Amino acid sequence: MSAVERLIRYCQIDTQSDPANEDVTPSTEKQFNLARVLEQELNELGLEDVCLDEHCYVYAKLPGNLDHEVKTVGFIAHMDTAPDFSGTNVKPRIIRNFDGNDIALNDEVTLKMDSFPWMRDLKGKDLLVTDGNTLLGADDKAGITCIMEALVWMKEHPEFRHGPIAVAFTPDEEIGNGPKYFDIEKFGADFAYTMDGGTVAELSDETFNAASAVVKFKGFSIHPGEAKDKMINAALAASEFASLLPKHMIPAHTEGREGFIHLHNMKGDCESAELEYIIRDHDYAKLQAKKELMRNALDYINAEYGEGTAEITFRDSYRNMKEILNQYPEVCAYGEKAIKELGYEIVHEPVRGGTDGAQLSFRGLPCPNLGAGGGNFHGRYEYCVINELEEARTLILNIIRLISEEV
Ligand SMILES: [Zn+2]
């Protein structure tokens, strides 16, 4: 079985997670369908301590065969697919020797190069695409595939010297609960890599710092005909608050390392109103400065409408993993060296979001993110570069070899 055959097999198992059921892990029972397949395959490969737990986390270990001790390296991928788009009845199609032109996914849906211009550079590669009706699921079944392929390769090459290896496959990453029941101790790695990115040239060691804010407005509602000098309109106060925040600091005007303040929900009437924000920045001090801007706006509203009209509550959700990874420079160094060995220039793209690895890093498992060859995630235009999927297997083996050379 080739890597792409393995990927197709995993993609055809529907594992969509469900944010409406986020209090339960896994959020959907069907994620067990892939977990059980992986559990069986890990057992067949002769791995040790293979375990599928009640929350749908799969763990396994491959003992080392070196005469000297090295650290245990882990590889992690998630089994669920995004709730944004259907993952039912996925029918992947292989395109050999891609000609660089638009791809008709079906009679109505075309993957246009004008919309995804970087795909023109994939000319000559083999691609896996959808039939236009579902997502592909390369996010993150390409990650699972390259980890499994590396394990298969090591079984076929017992002469390959390596240290102890831990692997884990997790549920519910797409709804933010991937690390929730992740048992770091049971996993047993000193550091790890999430295989959950795009191109294999990419190493992500930076995520956003993330916080949320809820702003509540209390009004004073009386008959509009008798409202002079009495009425306080909470909805108006809320809209004024929103207008006080910098216009350029919104997701639609930011990219790269620029953070933002994003109003994602609002409701209100004269009596009461509420605004919900998420705040993001790679730089923790700048994240705090954004909170300060919001506090200043709040003070202005309270001065204008009366003390106690508005109140704000902040909640921190995750931190930039760079802070932790800086303490373990060797972890990213292995990844960078392994990418270079594949012949790529490393792409250091700061993630404009979080990763499971960010949370795990703060819980004591340093964990940058690597690519497995996919792109256009979470929708019908998703694809996987089959050549890169195979290279991602080599990338894993390179990392394992580099660690084994450590004395
Ligand atoms: Zn993913």
Image: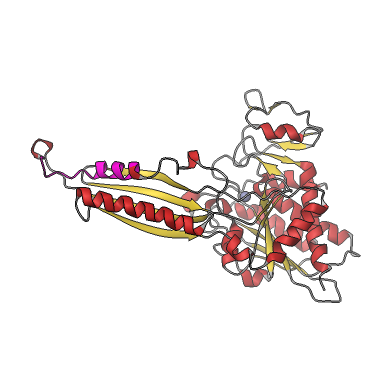
Establish if 179 lies above or below 93.
below
> In the rendered view, does 367 fall on the left or right side of 220?
right
Q: What stretch is highlighted in magenta?
A: 228-243
- The image position of residue 81, as x and y in percent, is 60, 47
Disc tally is 0
Nearer to us in this view, 119 or 229: 229
Establish if 99 lies above or below 361.
above
Extreme residue toward the right, this view:
159
Which residue: 65% across, 32% down? 116
- The image position of residue 318, as x and y in percent, is 51, 59
> Residue 184 lies in what quarter of the image?
bottom right
Q: Is the magenta stretch mostly helix, strand or loop?
A: helix
- The image position of residue 92, as x and y in percent, is 71, 37
> Residue 126 lies in what quarter of the image?
top right
> In the rendered view, does 123 fall on the left or right side of 315?
right
Which residue: 75% across, 72% down? 71
